[in-house]
Image: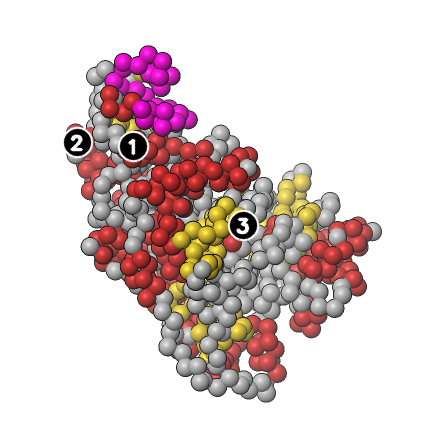
Amino acid sequence: MYKYDEYDHAMVAARVAEFSDQVKRRLAGEITEDQFKPLRLMNGLYLQLHAYMLRVAVPYGTLDSRQMRMLAHIARKYDRDYGHFTTRQNIQYNWIKLEDAPAILEDLASVEMHAIQTSGNCIRNISSDQWAGAAADEITDPRPWAELLRQWSSFHPEFSYLPRKFKIAVIAANEDRAAMRLHDIGIQIVEKDGEHGAAFYVGGGMGRTPMIAPLIKDFVPLGDMLSYAEACLRVYNRYGRRDNIYKARIKILIHELGADEYRRQVEEEFAHVKSLGIDPPKAEFDRIAEQFAPPALDASAPDAIDRSDPDFAVWVDQNVAAHKVPGHAIVNISLKPIGGIPGDASSAQIDLMADLAEKYSHDELRVTHAQNIVLPHVRKADLYAVWQALDGAGLATPNLDLISDIIACPGLDYCSLANARSIPVAQKIATRFSDLGRQKELGELKLKISGCINACGHHHAGHIGILGVDRKGTENYQLLLGGSGAEDVSLGTITGPGFDEDGVVDAIERVTDKYLAERSEGERFVDTFRRVGMAPFKEAIYG
Amino acid sequence: MVEYLQTGGEEPAVTLDAFLEQSNATAVRLEPDEDARALIPFLDRLALIEVAFPKFRDGRGYSSARILREAGYTGELRAQGDVLVDQIAYMKRCGFDSFAPEKPLNPDDVEAALTRWPAHYQGAADGAVPIWKLRHG
Ligand code: HEM
Ligand code: SF4
């Protein structure tokens, strides 16, 4: 894992001091809320329905146990004893007092964490593959590249007042576990002539106008990556729309210019930017990469798993994934107990996961964009002990990627922008499909819920997506089918008229029944949908 | 650092259009939607470029400033308009060397803002040595 050096520490300390000063001036009435807003947003502080919400950055979703325990401490001391893990691999606290924010940021800084640039119209926390460094299918660990981008984008003087927020994801495997092409910039590390470089996909995003990022450059050498990113951002900062907040994301600029014209402008800017010497030398990448060196795993560790406990075996089959080193496995901890709030974890649960990481996973944890937690490096021989501990804390729900592993935004229960509640719908769906045999029969089925058109719950990218809308003052839910945020990226299509809360649960049941009736051997729900199209499902839903 | 704060009084800056048309002016004003690169052929005879910030949220002027400095402009580069104390450190990094805020700034706050950062992660237009270079000499 990346460890701060003196410079990183000094930068975060300066930021805490700056923000403490800004809070002081705000509390003293020296600056207006309008002036304070962009400042607090750049420090992750939102004003919500009931209180301030603080969003803490978890760079590329990677944490150690000390950091995880600090997240529990903050939940316990400053919030209501729980935190909410988000689709951007961050954690949010929903009940924060403005006066406490500087103290929280100081606590975070003591474990090399912060809330810098987790909101606001700047380059946000960089996200990545939650299985980085462990996945059997990656060509390299993407996190050193992400860390290089994190440092470059932190306190970037030119790109802190962009037309709109800017999200970057970096992956290095063909399987896309980070919804890479639904980011403003999605980078895939690829290999060419024995060398690694960055493929740049630019202009993806969700929100009210979802778009899949087109490929802008197939191979940017490591030594040019920051210059290329700088060129991409400069063109956007200069020409992105500022007249209409709904058209201000880079996806709209690229859509209006066309990918070819955008690429031409970026290449021209890049030719200039490259002369400025802003790319660090290879030695800096190597310094960072060294800190992500794989943990010392014993490849001769026993590969067999004792499956005599049937509940354990069910969990292994669903929630444990292949590790690149024999004798080891990736443990996926579901934060989606049936009837629970997707992504929420109590302080005690967060502490327990930290303990398990320390004891069994080389002190590492990951947050996933599906709002779950990962222990990336667990010996197969330890899986049973890990499962028992998780099970005792309500953290062993064996539903990874099944219909009850639902992504849901905070919705109307917390969010001031919401049209409808997301959490109760998620709870009802999970409860309706609570029978595990039934869930497994349905197989991989990614269900994603947003409480409004902003799409924080990735509904466009759900195999089944739900969008909360406001219809004449009552909560109404539209259903979308056929989206995907993975390497087979696609955007869902609306089925037709919306439903009330119970109606949407019924409609999903009709959709899944139809799938079971229509599917061919080996097809996931989304495969069947792609083969047969919307019509049979529409018919099943609306009759 | 108080010398950064300008009160105006010198030759008035002309608009970009006026400058491109007549052009013996030595001071020009650039609006957010105007292309800084249009000035590149004339940089050696300009003494002042004033970059307008009608709204602090509109960050186009940061790119304009860097483009001008990157093209070798050495005259005064002034940020004018809705310029707040919380923006000036970034502005300075982008190459601004004077500020004409619509609402006066407290000189102590200006001093604090401009001296707050111990170092910088990335190269920009202020000549600061980026942290990666400090690390590797
Ligand atoms: C509760 C307070 C929140 C507010 C006020 C909020 C606000 C917004 C807004 C306005 C957008 C649309 C931006 C645009 O299209 O330009 C958006 C998008 C998004 N938000 Fe949130 N959000 C909140 C919580 C969350 C949470 C909890 C998550 C993660 C679970 C999240 C993740 C995202 C994602 C992934 C997007 C889509 C990005 C895209 O459009 O490409 N947000 N949010
Ligand atoms: S999708 Fe809408 S309701 Fe849900 S968190 Fe985002 S802004 Fe709020």
Dot 3 surroundings within 10 Å: few (below 14), some, or many (20 or more)? many
In the image, what residue type sits under mark 3?
Answer: Leu
Callout 2: CB less than 8 Å from ligand 1: no
Q: Chain of mark 3?
A: A
| Badge nearest the viewer, 3 or 2 | 3
Q: Is residue A139 left or right of residue A77?
A: right
Most foreground residue, B66 or A434: B66
Residue A143 included in the magenta stretch of the image: no
**x and y percent of residue A231 in the render?**
40, 41
Q: Residue A147, percent across and down?
A: 37, 57
- Residue B65 on image: x %, y %: 31, 32
Determine the chain carrying the residue at label 2: B
CA gap between label 3 and label 1 equals: 35 Å
Instruction: Return the residue nearer the eye: A436 or B64.
Output: B64
Do callouts 3 and 2 point to residues on the same chain?
A: no
**Residue reaching furthest front?**
A193
What's the magenta region? Answer: B15-41
Amino acid found under the numbered disc labelled 2? Val
| Residue A14 in view of the camera | no
Residue underneath mark 3: A182
Where does label 1 land, which residue? B71
In this rendered view, identify the residue nearer to me: A334 or B36. Answer: B36
Specify whether tag 3 is near ligand 1 (CB below 8 Å): yes
Q: Which residue is label 2 attached to? A: B2
Q: Residue at x 45, y 33 (%)?
A: A239
**Which label lies toward us, 3 or 1?**
1
Residue at 71 percent of width and 65 percent of height = A523
Q: Secondary structure at mark 2?
A: helix
Q: Quadrant of the C terminus of chain B?
A: bottom left
For the point 40% across and 78% down, the residue is A297
Whether residue B29 is in magenta: the answer is yes
